[in-house]
Amino acid sequence: MNIILMIFDSLRKDCVGVYGSPPWGKVQTPHFDALASESLVMKRAFPESLPTLPARRAIYTGQRVYPFHNGDFRLRGDFVGAPGWGPIPEEQLPLAEILHEAGWRTALIADVYHMFKPSKNFWRGFDQWTFLRGQEKDPARSGPKLTQAEIDYWLPKELQNEKSVAFIQQCIMNLHDRIKEEDYFAPRVLREAALWLEQNQDADKFFLTIESFDPHEPWLVPPHYRRMYSKKEGREQVKTGYEDVSHLDKKLLVRTRANYSGEVTLCDRWFGYFMESLRVLGLLGNTMVIFTADHGHSIGDRNYLGKRGYPSAPEVFAVPLLIRFPKAEHAGKTSNMFVQHHDITAAILEAVHVKPRVEIDGIPFLEDALAGSPGPRDHVTVGWGSAVTVITDRWWFNCKVDGSGVLLYDLEASEPFDRNVAHEHRDVVNNLFGQAKEDAGGSFPEWLVNLARNQADAPGCSDLAARM
């Protein structure tokens, strides 16, 4: 059996039609929806660690990254993105290495430039890896520089600062010769992946990982995609400020949402192109397709624009996870069991009956999900920076790893995230913090605790301290 792992960066779960709609209205994803109609749909999938690189370490290895032991990376050729923002440890075996050793032809097609920085090694185990240049601040070009007028067009004056201007400067500079839809990143990634299928028809079995950085910012889309969601002309807005946007011009927020929605639909269209290639090449009968994202993105939700682990929220932490079996077997099945990113490796190994040489943390879930079993987990723990989130059937718990700045939300409430109920449920707070600590192996790294102590509490958090 062939395996295809499709990962979109910053794809909100509620923007994939089978899961509903975002607060600003339905996003058009006919090809994602077609995949969902032929797939096992996992309804409660979450990351293991965030953001970009920690998430991929978990997905690629099946190992937990939380609580970031030996994760204070300060490597040449990169910025300090977050705890755990580093390469795959040498002692861990990526899924690509495991499957390569077991006879699969392996390939990675990606434009996630963080994976290919000088200090990284996420292409380990792949017979072919193809890096498409130019996303975000990838130093793909050094000129010509943008004029001030061009900067003012792409970046609203009220969002301009040294960092944001440098970001836009590199992003747009990388794209000077982009003239048609096929030149945009998602089309390039998915066309390259389809080409790989054509060129590797002689493989007995293959494992293809496709990484699309879209719909991550900057939300630069052909105008016709943005006009699907807002026909009004006005100032452009394509990036995140990672800040409260309650005072942002509402027209800019509308523009942001339209650009993001258009980016999702662009990804959907070219994913459809890729799936059609599978059909034409006769591969849908012997290939499993796994579709997911690393995380979502807040776009005005709770007056925030960006993504963060504290305070955490579903629009960032809940991820889509669709598994299409060969011949669309099990189409229409759904599962409410808790699964996490590092379970994906375990599920793939379960499906192809390969036992890894080293023990992994991920838990196989396909048999349980198809049988309607609740699975072994009664909660998930997600690490991001110096904060941790624990999610159960009823509770969403979030605090810093030193036990301060507590947020507790009752998922049975009509609007769960409108009110922090930590003071009313101190026993729940202590139990869930104890669970977070247990999942961390009993303790947190001292450097991470110190980081938490120096981090400001989130607005609206409780001043009570969680205790194990």
Image (cartoon, helix red, strand yellow):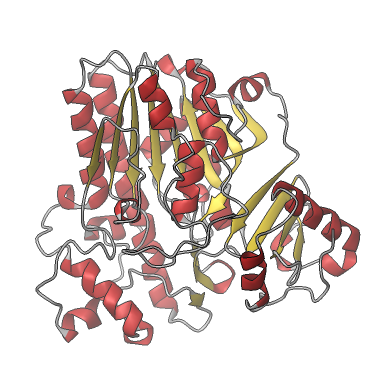
Q: What residue do we see at 40% from left, 18% from top?
A: 102
View extreme (front): residue: 91
Image location of residue 389, percent across then percent down: 67, 56
Q: Is residue 234 visible?
A: no
Report the quarter where the C terminus lies: bottom right
- 204 with respect to 59 (left or right): left
Instruction: Name the residue nearer the viewer: 75 or 3.
Output: 75
Above-or-below relation of 114 to 203? below
- 36 with respect to 399 (left or right): left
Instruction: Name the residue nearer the viewer: 237 or 78.
Output: 78
Q: Quadrant of residue 350?
A: top right
Q: What residue do we see at 56% from left, 51% from top?
A: 49
Above-or-below relation of 114 to 271? below
Q: Quadrant of residue 270?
A: top left
Q: How many numbered badges does the structure rendering display?
A: 0
Image location of residue 328, percent across then percent down: 44, 18
Image location of residue 246, percent across then percent down: 53, 80
Report the quarter where the N terminus lies: top left
Instruction: Name the residue nearer the viewer: 400 or 237.
Output: 400
- 359 with respect to 235 (left or right): right
Image location of residue 170, percent across then percent down: 22, 70
Q: What residue do we see at 54% from left, 41% from top?
A: 341
Q: Is residue 344 visible?
A: yes
Above-or-below relation of 39 to 130? above
Q: What residue do we see at 67% from left, 34% from top?
A: 337
Q: Quadrant of residue 279?
A: top left
